[in-house]
Amino acid sequence: MLDITSFSMETNLNVDFAQVYHNSCLYGKYQQIIEGLSRTSTGSKDLCLDCMHSHGFLTQCMACLWKQHWSYWRNPEHNAIRFLITVTVSVLFGTIFRGVALDLSKQQDLLNTLGATYASALFLGLTNTTAVQPIVGLGRTVFYRERSAGMYSAMPYTIAQVVIEIPYIVIQVLVFVLIIYPLIGFSWMLAKFLWFTFFVLLSVLYLTLFGMTAVALTPTQELAALISFFFFILWNIFSGFFIARPMIPLWWRWFYWVNPAAWTVYGLMVSQLGDRTETINIPGQASQSVKEFLEVYLGLEANFLGIAVAVQFIFIFLFLFVFCLCTKYLNFQRR
């Protein structure tokens, strides 16, 4: 059939099959059928579907979660690299700050412990932020195609993207804490160990969500990385490590209170050293207890521990909300 109806065969036969069909009775018959089917029958209603998707919200969530699970499982490079980074960073900082929290008889010992706490709070989370952005950026391209096909909505996709990260983050944090905690020399009290693990887990979680949010807000992964780097600089400067809160100029101190990294350092320091009463020697000043030094020099008060936890949960839900909102309403697809 294709050979006979080709343009070359039409030229050889000197026949225009399209014109032959147009002049046939079959053409007129089909035109009458089309005209009849085009008329709206009496009492008919427009076709209206109750839902855009064939399955409910829970089914969509389970399907998206299953898809994300296999996507992560079949991408061992991503997970292997971040676990390798976790072990490397924990061993590196653990050996650098080995035993700094065992003896707090000098001011420098306490500042070294602050440095170890600062490193524990942020560096693992910052590497996660950078590592998760290519994964989310690649998945967004697939999401645009599958959402336009009506396979699922934006909310199940974002929920699955966040939920699939949680088991990997928990394993990362446990490996990190089990290596770095004894090397730094923090107390092996169960409550303090759990507080340390809890605050590191929260910091890695909100920094991972921040990386996802940066991708959802921007059209390209490069721009997301640039914005993330800008916020990393600000958060590091005002985290309370490079400059203590009482020393920050008054007109900039507000940024300390809205800085999630500052609250992580706050919670870690207070939970580990807030009840220490041994005396430390301060050059040029009278000796103080560890608790007094935290309050006077660093501005860290033990009664703010619950607020530190609440603020970090606020940032987690804020980044999660913005990520869901941007994924649903922003579309950077060019075609």
Image (cartoon, rainbow, N blue to C red):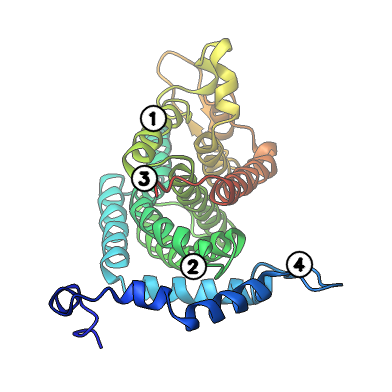
* C-alpha gap between disc 4 and disc 2: 41 Å
Mark 3 or 1: the one toward you: 1
Vertical relation: 272 (above or below) 257:
below
Q: What's under tag 2, amino acid-wise?
A: Ile
* C-alpha gap between disc 3 and disc 1: 15 Å
Q: Secondary structure at mark 1?
A: helix
Q: Left or right of 296: which side holds 89?
A: left
Label 3, on which residue?
Answer: 123
Q: Earlier in the sequence, mark 2 or mark 1?
A: 2
Q: Position of residue 333 (x, y in %)?
A: 42, 48
Q: Secondary structure at mark 2?
A: loop
Q: Quadrant of residue 30?
A: bottom right
Label 2, on which residue?
Answer: 164
Q: Position of residue 221 (x, y in %)?
A: 34, 44
Q: Are marks 4 and 1 in contact (CB under 8 Å)?
A: no
Which mark, by number, is residue 230?
1
Q: Left or right of 136: which side holds 32?
A: right
The residue at the point 50 percent across, 15 percent down is 247
**Foreground of the two, 1 or 76:** 1
Mark 3 or 4: the one toward you: 4
Q: Earlier in the sequence, mark 4 or mark 2?
A: 4
Q: Earlier in the sequence, mark 4 or mark 1?
A: 4
* C-alpha gap between disc 3 and disc 2: 21 Å
Q: Earlier in the sequence, mark 3 or mark 1?
A: 3
Q: Earlier in the sequence, mark 3 or mark 2?
A: 3
Q: Residue furthest bottom?
A: 1
Vertical relation: 132 (above or below) 34:
above
Q: What's under tag 4, amino acid-wise?
A: Asp
**Foreground of the two, 219 or 106:** 219
* Crowding at mark 3 (Cα within 10 Å: few <14, some 14-19, many 20+): some
